[in-house]
Amino acid sequence: MIRKMLTAILSLTCVLGAAAGIAACTERVGSGGNKNTTTYFEKPDFAVVSDLDFELNEQKTAYTVTGIGREESTKITIPDDYNYTDEVTKETKKLPVTAIAAEAFSSEAGKKIEAVYIGANVAEIGEGAFTGCNLNSITIPDNVRTIGTGAFSNCTNLYNINIGSGLTTIPESAFMNCRSVTKLRLPNTVTNVGKSAFENCTGIKTLTMSTGCMRIEDRAFYGCTGLGDLKLTSPTLRYIGESAFYGCTGLITADISGTGINEIGFNCFGRCGNLTRMTVPFVGRMPYEALRTQYGGNAGSTDMISEEVKDSETGEGVSYTYTIFGYIFGATNPGENNTQQYGGRYIPQSLKTVIVKGRGNEVIAQQAFANCYHIKELEISGVQKLGTNCFFLISLDYLVLGKEVNSFGTAIFFSSGQHVNRLYYGGTVSSFNNITGNNTDNSNQFAGKYYLTETSSSTGWHWVSEAIEPYTDANNNGRYDVGEPYTDTNGNGSCDTVQVPRPWTNN
């Protein structure tokens, strides 16, 4: 350890200005170019003189900041470089300061730091470097390439985080328990959000994810209770880990359909007790081997269909099996005669609307929504098969099926006591009748009205297009009531049209 005093003079003008009581000069720092990927920040007007601890590397080419040293200020500058004097020649030259050591500011004096400027040559911030510090804002400049585990964890006063374009990974526990952060934006360079990276950041209300993100690891946003709406759109995103959004009790809506996700981890959205609307690309898909571990002998059950999905980046294939929706909320064994098999007791009671935007060949597996009796509205597109008992013991206000559906399993609602009041289907009457397995058992469970893309007076099915249905509003209540007669109040030879509750189309 070599302790030296650093006297850094920004410029003669700055010093003279400070001496005269004038605010010190600032300097714009940044690499230029795309404003969406480059973080610009200003050199602060504080700590032009620092007395930190520095350590020279073995090659005698660079310095690492290792501690607070004799610095008494709560606002510090990590300098761009530090003076080195050759012991033999006595020549002095400047060497870059390239790193901040692990736990550099973990001492009681270090934890008092309220603000820090990170120099232009720093490429690495070590594990726990600023853990528990009194920071209120941090800018990680573009030149920083890596930060260590827990680097800024437990900075409970930290409300502002600016992450530069140099980082590709937010490591494990990097910002855990930073409860004062309200807005979080990850640059497009970030491809991986590590385990517990933002766990218990309860103040986060808005989250803007990197469009290049590929993985969100286990517990990454666990307990972020302030998060109200979640929309992930990265086409490269392949994986959301176990309990990644567990306990996000403020979450109202979640939409992860616009991603390239292949797997959603167990209990990913557990204890999200206020979730009302969810949009997903598939229902309960998980790796087949994981299913065997989780569910044992039931892994080969009927309609739990295995397929191989190849990653577009690596070309490697992974076998996936379709299983229950409740899996992502913490539901476990789908074995028979086990009430815990179903998602009903795990899925939030507030969750009324589920939208499945499949990719053309998805499957709603056997018992996928079994006992999820709180769900009342299901919209399903890009799905080919509805498995046996997939809506086991639930009744729906409406069910929207895309025209891709070509197969029904046996008794998808299980019994005639459970049914759907309204069925919206994107194909024709003929194609609906030709769906494999669309037998009397299933037809009886479609207890309400059918709305298809083709008029058929004999069945009562009729045209649905661009959110307009040809029926009357005889009660003048702005909607169609089941059992209400079709009339021609306008005398124009056709039924009147009124707006349906949701914008169904025949696409």
Image: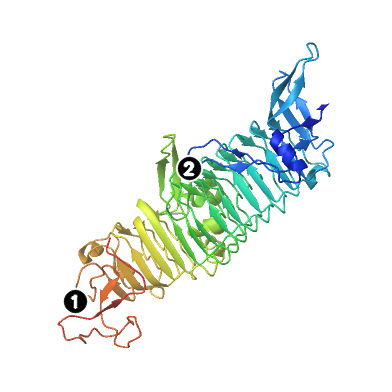
At which x and y percent is residue 184?
58, 52
Identify which residue, 338 or 502, lies in the foreground: 502
Q: Quadrant of the C terminus?
A: bottom left
Q: Secondary structure at mark 1?
A: loop
> Which amino acid does the dot numbered 1 rest on?
Ser
> Which amino acid does the dot numbered 2 rest on?
Gly
Instruction: Name the residue carrying label 1.
Output: 458
Q: Quadrant of the N terminus?
A: top right
At which x and y percent is residue 31?
54, 35
Comes first in the chain, label 1 or label 2: 2
Mark 1 or 2: the one toward you:
2
Identify which residue, 294 or 232, lies in the foreground: 232
- Position of 448 relative to 325 (above/below): below
Instruction: Name the residue carrying label 2.
Output: 212
Q: Which mark is residue 147?
A: none
**Identity of the residue drawn at 44% across and 71% down:** 376
Q: CA distance from mark 1 to mark 2?
A: 52 Å
